[in-house]
Image (spheres, rainbow, N blue to C red):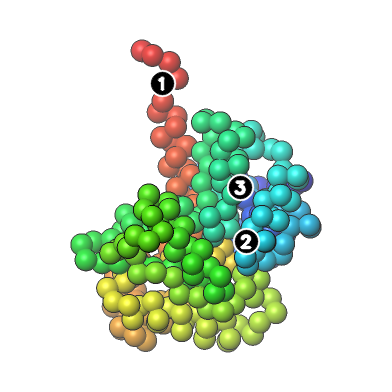
Amino acid sequence: MSTTLVRGQGTKILLLNPNSSSSMTDGMKAVVNDIDLPYSTEVYTYTGPPDSPASIDNDTDIKASKDAVLADFSGASGYDGIVVACFSVHPLVPELQSHTGPHRAITGIFEASVLAAISLLEPRETWGIVTTGKFWEDHLSNGVRAFLGAGTADGNAKFAGVQSTGLNASDFHHGVDPAVVRQKLKAATKRLLDTGKVHVIVMGCAGMAGLEDIIREAASEEYGEEFAYSILHVIDGVRAGVMQVDHMIRNQRLRPGRKP
């Protein structure tokens, strides 16, 4: 098991990539270095072991990545907070929470992105997710409802749903022509925008880190530059996760630890 220091000193945050793709972790590092955090905040990265899937694309991959990481990773106590960097309802989040207790801040990029999206909405606006394969449409839609405390059959007037690109997470970094990636990501973005009043788009895959410009380009083609660059919010899950866990750590430190 190994981790790499990306920045800072002081508070320690681990960005945990549960798949085995080091190139995907490298894409996350670029996002981390662009986050406005105190220099005293250290952000480390971890990449899943070789027996973890290189791309997490379904329930089988989710479980395999959980098992591989739990067998390999034993350093949770060395960090103030951990971000599970797979955009899914990933079982590593509750597993790490149960293993580390109430004094460690742990979240996933999925959960952090939902909270960030909701916080940015104004009345009558909606938000939605652009993701990879078809599997994720139901998985993430059901995940949003469950995270917000709703039943699977309940509607949500503020959630515009999930649109998929037909790509796998690994396709964003190798194996697929970048022009094809751009075309499919733009098409999914436009379908989401066509549902109406979407003002927040979440990039629903850690592998999309750094691809915000493609989302905005598609929005500009549909609704003009002012909407795309001055009105639309595009949420990167990695950025949302690191910012959320930093906020969680600060709030946890407010607890007195004993009765006054």
Residue 206, x across and y down, in percent: 56, 63
Q: Residues within 10 Å of mark 1 (few under 14, many from 20)?
A: few
Q: Residue furthest front?
A: 153
Q: Residue furthest right?
A: 50
Residue at 54% across / 59% down in the picture? 88
Residue 259 or residue 11, whichever sits in front: 259
SS under mark 1: loop
Query: Disc 1 marks which residue?
Result: 256
Does residue 179 lie above or below 116 as drawn? below
Residue 15, x across and y down, in percent: 60, 50
First in residue order: circle 3 vs circle 1 = 3
Q: At label 1, which amino acid type do we have?
A: Pro
First in residue order: circle 3 vs circle 2 = 2
Residue at 61% across / 47% down in the picture? 92
Query: Disc 2 marks which residue?
Result: 59
Report how far apart the C-alphas of labels 3 and 2 lie in the structure.
13 Å
Q: Is residue 22 visible?
A: no
Report how far apart the C-alphas of labels 1 and 2 lie in the structure.
40 Å
Does residue 253 lie above or below 114 as drawn? above
Residue at 64% across / 75% down in the picture? 171
Residue 26, x across and y down, in percent: 65, 62
Disc assigned to residue 92 = 3
Q: At label 3, which amino acid type do we have?
A: Leu
Query: Pointers 3 and 1 in contact (CB under 8 A)?
Result: no
Report how far apart the C-alphas of labels 3 and 1 lie in the structure.
28 Å
